Image: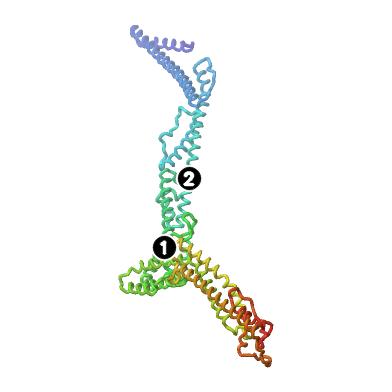
Amino acid sequence: MSLSSSSTCTSLLQELQIIWDEIGEGYSERDKMLLELEQECLDIYNKKVDKTRKHRAELQRSLAQSEAEIATLVSALGEQVSFSKKEGSLKEQISSVKPVLEELMVKKDMRWKEVSEIVTQIAEISSNIAGNDSLVSSGFEVDGSDLTKRKLDELRAHLQDLRSEKAVRLQKVNSYISAVHELSEILSFDFSKALSNVHKSLTGASKSISNDTLARLTELVESLRKERRQRLLKLQGLGRNMQELWSLMETPTDERRRFDNLSILLSVQADDALGKGCLGLDIVREAEDEVNRLNALKSSKMKELVLKRHCELEEICREVHMDFNSDAARQSLINLIGSGDADLSGILESLDEQIEKAKEEALSRKEILDKVEKLKHAKEEEKWLDDYEKDENRFSAVRGAHKNLKRAEKARSLISKIPAMIDGLTTKVKAWEKERGVPFLCDKHPLLQTLEEEIVLRAQREEEKRQFREQKRLQGQLATEKEAKYGSKSAKKKPLGQSLNTDNVTKTPLGRRVGTTPGRSGVKDYRESGRGNATAIPLNYVALQKED
């Protein structure tokens, strides 16, 4: 206690003694009051000591907490912090610890904020992937006890993985959206409505990338592609039916033009690019209506079409000389149609099949029939040449005689090829019959038999010609022997231009003889019969002039 305090207490006691004296207070009472004063002073001291003790305890606790916090922060941040603990009073120790604690708290706050931002982004992306409208907080709370650099790097790596996955998913979503948009233009449906049915966010800026959205988009695209294929196949089928019916009904070109886009689809493959709206439901309905219209029209004209197809079949068979009993078949068909019980569609299909088979048959017979026609032409030329060589006036000075001579030369060349033509044709026919297992009929007769008969007839004709030539040779030889034995009669002279006898008018002049093929007897026979007077020039000889 200070000196001034002691003086004050003493003066107060003195003053109290004076007052007691004045009052007349007894000594016992005075002692009691002094004891009370001492007790009160003691209580006050005790209170003050207790308070001071508590303050010391608080300082000690604060120091311990600061040190504990420093230890916790060091552990949480994963950093090594060294600081020297001062020796001295508690306040001095606290003052030395406080800056370190504050620095660590600042680092913790910064690390906490950084981790919180990353965790928030992870939760947001995870929510998008999970397809939740609200953030997924479970499993993504910030752990204050682990704010180390390693933990921060792990969170960053996880965030990067999620961002990459989000980018991949978003790319898939955009790819599906583009596919839906392309198909919507081809199939003519509401693009936005189709996407909204999958997820309402797909029409906005922020699109859902959840597994459910991707699965539904995949299902949508697959269903649309399937619909695209089905509509394309359906329109191609309608287009083919339409073209068949157009051809059947002989529809004018002007009426077909409005379906030109449908005709283009016939050559399109399943994965080829298609134009806008070309597979729309309106196009399908329009094509179906046109096919239905043509089918109804076809039903009304079926009888006419059946008879027309039959005529077409008859014409094909007639052109290639195929066996076809047209009159009986036509009458049977007319009777069947007239009965009213016939399935005209079935008959028409049957006729179409017969026409296709007839066309195939005609194509396989074409080469042989062309050779048959060439052989016929050669035989016609042969017949003409025979008639021409029997004409004794063929060398007379008439208009066009030189043309006949040229034709005769060509005919002889062509006739010389007939045996080879027959042999080649026979080989072709045998190969054809072997391949198909049926005889080759030409105008209801086996062509091979006809060729064999032709070979026999030609051999007989050649033998007859040979015998005729031999007979002419013997007659000429006999005439020559008679002339040598008895001599020739001298003819009387007559004016130029008149023959010695009427028979000389038809003789062939020597100056106009032409070479003949072996087997021909025209000029050669005359040369043999007139060998005794070979240098005489007939009086009826006239030089022929070529026509231009």
At x 50% / y 37%, what residue is drawn? 160
- Classify the position of the C terminus by image quarter: bottom right
Residue 429 position (above or below residue 227): below
Residue toward you, 527 or 271: 527
Of the residues shown, which amino acid type is indicated by label 1? Leu
Left of 394 or right of it: where is 200? Answer: left
Q: Secondary structure at mark 1?
A: helix
Q: Is residue 69 visible from the viewing direction of this image?
A: yes
Give the total number of marks visible in the rendering. 2
Q: Residues within 10 Å of mark 1 (few under 14, many from 20)?
A: many
Looking at the image, what colour scheme do you see?
Answer: rainbow
Q: Is residue 401 visible from the viewing direction of this image?
A: no
Quarter where residue 397 is shown: bottom right
Which residue corresponds to mark 2? Answer: 170
Residue toward you, 290 or 93: 290
Q: Residues within 10 Å of mark 2 (few under 14, many from 20)?
A: some
Q: Tell me where residue 251 appears, x and y as whole percent.
A: 44, 71
Separation of residues labelled 1 and 2 (CA atoms): 40 Å
Quarter where residue 209 is shown: top left
Which residue corresponds to mark 1? Answer: 238
Q: Tell me where residue 456 appears, x and y as whole percent.
A: 49, 70
Residue 273 position (above or below residue 474): above
In the rendered structure, find residue 152 and report the number of the disc placed on it: none
